[in-house]
Amino acid sequence: MRMLDHVGAVEEWAREEFGSVDLGDVRRGRRLQDVAARMASRPGSSLPKLFPKWRDLKSVYGLFRRKESRLDRIESEHWSRVRRKCGEAGEYLLVQDTTSLDYSGHFSVEGLGRIGDDGGRGFMLHTTLALRLEGAQEEGLGYRVIGLAHQKIWSRVEDTHHGRESRRERLARPRESLVWSDCVGEIGLAPRGGESSWVLVGDRGSDVYETLVSCRSQGLEFLLRACQDRVVEGGDHLFSVSRSAPSLGSFALHLRGRGGRVSREARLEVSAVEVALRPPWRPGRGLGEGQWERVWAVRVWEEAAEEGKPALEWILLSSRPVRGFGEARGAAERYQLRWTIEEYHKCLKTGLRVESHQLKRADRLEGVIAVAGVVAVRLLALKTLARLHPQSPASSLPFPSLWLDVLRSWYSQFGPVARWDAESVIKALGRLGGHLGRRRDGLPGWQALWCGWLRLQDMVMGAEIYGGKFG
C-alpha cells in the first residue's frame, strides 16, 4: 500500500479496493468497480446521474438487489488490506464511533429501523477508522488515514419498551452498547510481540465494561472517555478520585471548531491516577463479581474557560501506564484525534450525500452505503496530504506530472510560486475549490480540497484534448 494510495486515478483506485471482492460473478465485480469509480469521480451524485444510460443503471440496480451485495461482503477486502497495513511497525489508532443514517423522507423504503428519538427511520452505522501516528506537527500529532478496519450496519427493529421495564430487565436483554466490544472481537487479535501497537479510541459511548474486557482479550490498548462514575477499589468513585489528583503540568492544544464554536488554542492541565474499576452487575453475576479492571484515569481540563462557556474536561481511561507529564499529554493528544471519525461521517453524509439515495428496500441501500463507505476514506485522505511532510517536493506526491503542471500554472495567477512542495499543492487545490487562503485561514478542509480536485480533473481533460491526445 503506497503512502497515499487513496488518491490518484479513480479506475486504478477502484481496482485496488474492490478488484478482489467475490460477488459470485466476475461481471458483478466489474460493475462494483465501475460504481466505485464513478462515485469517487462525482461525489454526491445520484445513481441515475452516475449512470445516465438505462441499460447501465438497470445493471446497477440488479447488482444491489443481490444478497451478496451487503456491507460486510463489499468492504471485506478493504478491511483486510487495512489490518495488514496496521501490522507494520508503528502506532495505530482505531477510532470508533456510531452515527445514524437518516432516510425518514423516503417513505416507501421497506426494512428501515428507528433512529434518534424513535421519530426517524434509517440505519445505525458503527465505524472503526484506522490512523497511523506520524509524530508531532504544528497543531498536534500528525497522522495518516489508513482506512476502515471494520464497519457494522443495523436497523433498530425491536420494541422500544418506553420505560415499561426495570433497570435489571433492561440490562438483561441484548444491549446496543455491546457493538463496541463486538466490533473489537470482529477486528481480531492485535499483533503481538512486534513493533506495531493498536489503540482503541472512543468517546463516552465506548465506556462499557465489556469494551475493556474485549480489548484486553484481543491484545488492544485503549483510550476511552469515561461516562460512568464507576466505583473504584477502596469504595470511592472514579470522577472524585480523578479530580483530586494533582496537576502534572499544562500545555497548549489546538481544539477544532464545532457546535458554533470557532477553533482555538486551549491551555490545558493534565493529571493521572491508577484505579481499579468495579465490575457491574450482569445476568448470572452479581455486582462486583468478576475481573476488576485496572486502568489509568487521565484528567484533562481547563482552569479558565472562555466567558459564558463551560470549561473543557475529559476523564480518559487508559490501558497504558501514565506516570508523568509526557505520557499524560500524549494521551490527551491522541484522544484529540477522535474528531477524525466525525470528519469521516461528514464525508459520508455531506460529501457523498449517502442519505439521498432512493432505492426501494433497506437491504439494497446497504450495498450503496458500503461502496460509499470506502469512497469516503478517499475524500478524508485528501485533507491529510500536506500535514505529513509539508516541505517534500510536489513530485513525491502520487499525482501525474501533467496534473501538477496544470495546477501550478493556474495557481501562479495569484503570485509567483516560490516553493512547489506538498503544502503548496494542497493550498492550490483548496484555492481551486473555493478556499480563500488568507493568512489566518489555515490549510483548506476536505470539502474545499475535493471541490478543487474535481475542477482539476476537468482542467486536465481540457489540457489533454488541447494537446491532441484525444484526436
Image: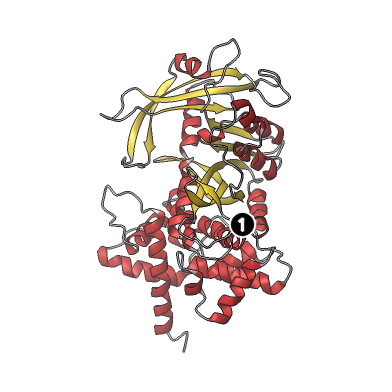
Residue 5 visible, this angle:
no
Residue 127 visible, this angle:
yes
Few, some or many residues within 10 Å of mark 1 (<14, 14–19, 20+): few
Quadrant, the N terminus: bottom right
Residue at 64% from the left image edge and 64% from the top image edge = 18
Residue at 26% from the left image edge and 63% from the top image edge = 414
Residue at 51% from the left image edge and 47% from the top image edge = 115
The kind of residue on which mark 1 rests is Met
Q: How many marks?
A: 1
Q: Position of residue 90 (x, y in %)?
A: 60, 42
Q: Position of residue 333 (x, y in %)?
A: 46, 34
- Along the line of sight, the residue nearer the viewer: 23 or 268: 23
Q: Secondary structure at mark 1?
A: loop
Q: Position of residue 382 (x, y in %)?
A: 46, 56
- Along the line of sight, the residue nearer the viewer: 214 or 336: 214
Q: Position of residue 203 (x, y in %)?
A: 51, 35
In the image, taking residue 299 as reference, residue 83 lies left or right, namely: right
In the image, taking residue 362 as reference, residue 436 lies left or right, namely: left
Q: Which residue is mark 1?
A: 1
The answer to which image quadrant residue 420 occupies is: bottom left
In the image, taking residue 392 as reference, residue 185 lies left or right, namely: right
Colour logic: secondary structure
